[in-house]
Image (cartoon, grey):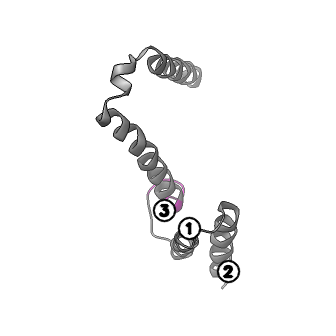
């Protein structure tokens, strides 16, 4: 039963968040501080997601050499302006190759 309470609470929270975006006055959205915050928050959230997914394995964060090497290869591919699919293949390939050895 606790799972359903969490699912319903999450659904209500998501709906309230979307509704909040719709009823926010235009003058608030045009404020430069709000625009800057809106531009930076997705980057911060994506970075946190990548860090947790790259460094966590069944709970606590841990340093895993193949994962970190794959993440480094992905960053290098991004810096070289590679397409996203190429970035994924490079990261997976480096990680898999290091795990093989």
Mark 3 → mark 2, Cα distance in angstroms: 18 Å
10 Å crowding of disc 3: few (<14), some (14-19), many (20+): some
Q: Which residue does the numbered mark 3 point to in the structure image? A: 55
Residue found at x 65% / y 85%: 101
Q: Closer to the camera, 33 or 57?
A: 33
Q: Quadrant of the N terminus?
A: top right
Q: Identify the image quadrant of residue 80.
A: bottom right
Q: Which residues are magenta?
A: 54-60
Q: Which mark is residue 64?
A: none
Residue 35 lies within the magenta run: no
> How far is the residue under mark 3 from the one under mark 1?
19 Å
- Most extreme residue toward the bottom is 101
Along the viewing direction, whichever of 35 and 50 lies nearer the viewer = 35
Image location (x, y in percent) of residue 2:
54, 22
Q: Position of residue 9 (x, y in %)?
A: 51, 19
Numbered disc in front, either 2 or 1 = 1
Badge 3 or badge 1: first in the primary sequence: 3
Q: Is residue 94 left or right of residue 21?
A: right
Question: Residue 83: x and y, percent?
Answer: 66, 64
- Quick one: SS at disc 2? helix
Q: Main structural element of the magenta stretch: helix, strand or loop?
A: loop
Residue 97 is labelled as 2
Q: Mark 1 — residue?
A: 78
């Amino acid at each position: 039963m606790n799972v359903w309470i969490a699912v319903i609470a999450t659904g209500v929270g998501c709906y309230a968040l979307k509704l909040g975006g719709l009823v926010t006055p235009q003058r608030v959205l045009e404020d430069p501080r709000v625009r800057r915050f809106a531009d930076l928050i997705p980057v911060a959230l994506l970075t946190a997601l990548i860090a947790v997914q790259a460094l966590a394995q069944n709970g606590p964060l841990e340093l895993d050499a193949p994962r970190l090497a794959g993440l480094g290869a992905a960053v290098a591919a991004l810096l070289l302006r590679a397409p996203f699919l190429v970035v994924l293949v490079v990261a997976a390939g480096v990680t898999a190759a290091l795990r093989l050895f």
